[in-house]
Amino acid sequence: MCRLSCIFHSPATGRLTMLSRTAVRMMLLCGPMLITSLAEAADWPQFLGPNRNGTSNEAGLLDRFPEGGPEVVWRVPGGVGMSAVAVADGLAITSWNRQRKQWLVALDVETGDVRWQTPIAESYGNAMGDGPRATPTIHDGVIFVFTGEGVLCAVEQESGRLEWNIDTVAAFGTRPAEYGMSSSPLVVGNHVIVHVGAPAATIGAFDVKTGQPVWKAGQGPAGYSSPTLLDVAGREQVVSVTGDQAIGLDPATGETLWTYPFKTNYACNTANPIVVDGGVFISAGENHGSVLLDIKEESGRYAVSERWSSLHSKSVMRNEWQTSVVVDDYLYGFDNVGAAGPVTHLSCIEATTGKPVWQEARFGKGNLVLADGKLWITTMKGELVLVKVTPEGYQELGRARLFGETRQTMSIANGLGYTRDDREVLCIKLK
Ligand SMILES: *[C@@H]1O[C@H](CO)[C@@H](O)[C@H](O)[C@H]1NC(C)=O
């Protein structure tokens, strides 16, 4: 099998010089096969996948599970934390608490062997759970990771060596968010962007090479969501759902293009914004609900309007920490009922109208990603559940118990799924 995805991941030409001799030989040997592996090559280098919308382009994945569930390729000891697994260039990278420290850990994608581990801060925890919250971002040979207390670190991918770090919370004169700093770093050009939550800097951008602050934007609480690069109103914008608003920013300057108030109890906005039919869909739990925003630009001024909204205690969709996915104008997501969401439905709604389509009542808490026309759901009960993407109704294709309680999504790369709980990291065969 010719698995060369690692070589082609980075568009930067400089990376080609890092090709090992074996890889070059393989390239020559693989010949025609190379085309196929190139086309299929897919990494999951950050939170919610290549486009940060929970969607993988992988095809030909399992349509049902074999007896006893999909094959576990490897399973290795891990640590405590809420960080998901980022996969690129032959490494599966995550972070956790262990022996009184937060660690960034790089595992070999094929074997699960630890390639390196780097301490990035003291261990982190609070009443909402222990360990780092954010998922590391792999970009151009560097890994960016955000600790629970808000220290942003850049670590060299090859060696695991810390290149720089900055206490973003101290830099902007604030304190960490109540439940911990949770935004997974977003890299746009030369900037790495996180939610800081300072009175005069909700969001901060830092130089990828030095960690120096470049711009700041917004005011008020960080919330628990992550900045996202979206194509809306005819341009790329950094769109963030912070503790009390949605905001669109110029990625280069941090200039605020538009805002929309989105105040939730406990500033608990956690799900990521996604594009729905050219608009921006945002959603929160605590009985808050969802809205689809239309953003229009006219001679440099941006106007925000609600295409539909369902913002009340009987809302059609109340995402907590689970970001929904959209397929063919239908949106699939977890609807959490009530404060702290003791009851969770898996729901499908019409994305452009908010009209309910179907609901698997009391499905239970989990997280989902989309690949190959199926939802890959990791549940807090420790199951992997496979559900067909269709507006026709809930169709379960498979269910297997492979891990313990988790809130992480499955990261899908090259036919394999990576996930973790508080004890182990797993690689699961999805093909
Ligand atoms: C995810 O984002 C990419 C890039 O913006 C886009 O092409 C794709 O349609 C999105 N997928 C979904 C399901 O929204």
Image (cartoon, rainbow, N blue to C red):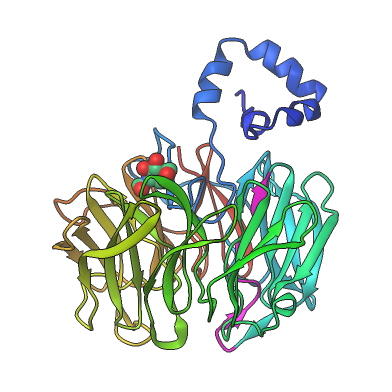
Secondary structure that dominates the magenta span? loop
The structure residue drawn at horizontal position 74% and vertical position 23%, both measured from the top left corner, is: 23
Which residue is more in the foreground, 430 or 315?
315
Q: Which residues are magenta?
A: 127-139
Residue 215 within the magenta-colored segment of the rendering: no
Q: Is residue 169 left or right of residue 35?
A: right
Q: Quadrant of the C terminus?
A: top left
**Residue 184 can be seen, yes or no:** yes
Q: Whole-percent x and y of residue 76?
A: 67, 57
Q: Is residue 28 above or below residue 271?
A: above
Q: Whole-percent x and y of residue 14?
A: 76, 30
Residue 132 within the magenta-colored segment of the rendering: yes
Figure quadrant of residue 265: bottom left
Which residue is more in the foreground, 50 or 399?
50
Q: Whole-percent x and y of residue 268?
A: 45, 80
Q: Is residue 319 left or right of residue 175?
A: left
Which residue is more in the foreground, 330 or 412?
330
The structure residue drawn at horizontal position 71% and vertical position 27%, both measured from the top left corner, is: 13
Q: Name, please, the residue furthest toward the front.
A: 299
The structure residue drawn at horizontal position 39% and vertical position 33%, both measured from the top left corner, is: 60
Q: Whole-percent x and y of residue 233?
A: 35, 50
